[in-house]
Amino acid sequence: MMMRMGSVMRKVVCLLAWLSVGQVSGSYLPQDMNRTLQDLLQHYKISKSDIYDGKQVFPKEELKGKMESQMLFMGGVLEAYEKLIVHMLKELPTPSPLSATSGDKADTSGPSTAKPLAAGNTRSNLNKVLEKIRDLKLHSYKEQVKILHELQKLKHIEMDNIKVQGKALWELPWIYEKANSLADNVMRRRRRRRQTRTKSRLGA
């Protein structure tokens, strides 16, 4: 059980660190979100050796290919983050009736209130991050997430169903032709780009 908890904690911290990479790489990470992530990393602590062990939760190599592939992969990453943070919220202690009731003031001077208060801050911070992720998905990755959902449906095709098998064979000519057409269009586009670059170099 302890090993499993340690594994989950390691993934959480690596994910939060992966999210906060924008602090170094550019200006796309809002300052308030970065502060929130830094606060969360104080709560979800693991050793530096675990953080820098070379085993990334989301390999960054996937973000070095074509732009379309990067966008699709990032849509999946945001989906994973959303599910993870929802899971993390469920793992937090349930707020006590006293702290959940508006207008009631708890005595925060004693150690007994320290953990509930910490959990409350963590819950608030996780909800802030979750809102940011959902906004980004909605406004910039809607198409990619839709494609990912459709791909998930393909995993549930009834392989043993004779009706499904027959219909799939009837649909295959169109699918096969479309697949070849798409691949051919991609090749032509690449060829045109190469020709354009060659002409540009020759004309320079």
Image: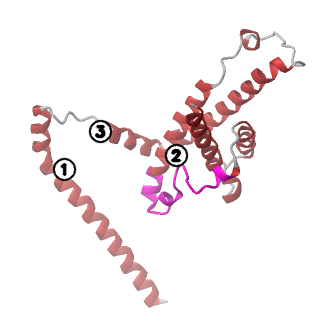
Residue 120 is drawn in which quadrant? top right
Residue lying furthest front: 2
14 above or below 204?
above
Please tell me the numbered disc located at residue 175.
1
The alpha-carbon separation of the residues under discs 1 and 2 comes to 29 Å
77 above or below 203?
above
Query: In x, y percent, where is residue 25?
Result: 66, 59
Task: Report whether 107 appears left or right of 30.
Answer: right
Judged from the image, the secondary structure of the residue bearing numbered disc 2 is helix
Q: Are marks 1 and 3 in contact (CB under 8 Å)?
A: no
Q: Disc 2 residue type?
A: Ser
Question: Of the residues under marks 1 and 2, which one precedes in the sequence?
Answer: 2
Q: Are marks 1 and 2 in contact (CB under 8 Å)?
A: no
The alpha-carbon separation of the residues under discs 1 and 3 comes to 17 Å
Q: Residue at x 43, y 46 (%)?
A: 144
127 above or below 147?
above
Residues rendered magenta in the picture:
49-72
Quarter of the figure with the N terminus: top right
- The reply to whether the magenta stretch includes residue 61 is yes
Q: Disc 1 residue type?
A: Ile
Evaluate whether residue 101 shows in this view. Answer: yes
Evaluate whether residue 28 shows in this view. Answer: no
Q: Disc 3 residue type?
A: Lys
Q: Mark 2 sits on what residue? A: 140
Q: Nearer the viewer, mark 3 or mark 2?
A: 3
Question: Of the residues under marks 3 and 2, which one precedes in the sequence?
Answer: 2
Q: Residue at x 37, y 43 (%)?
A: 147
- Disc 3 residue crowd, few under 14, some 14–19, many 20+, Cα 10 Å: few
73 above or below 168?
below
Q: Mark 3 sits on what residue? A: 155
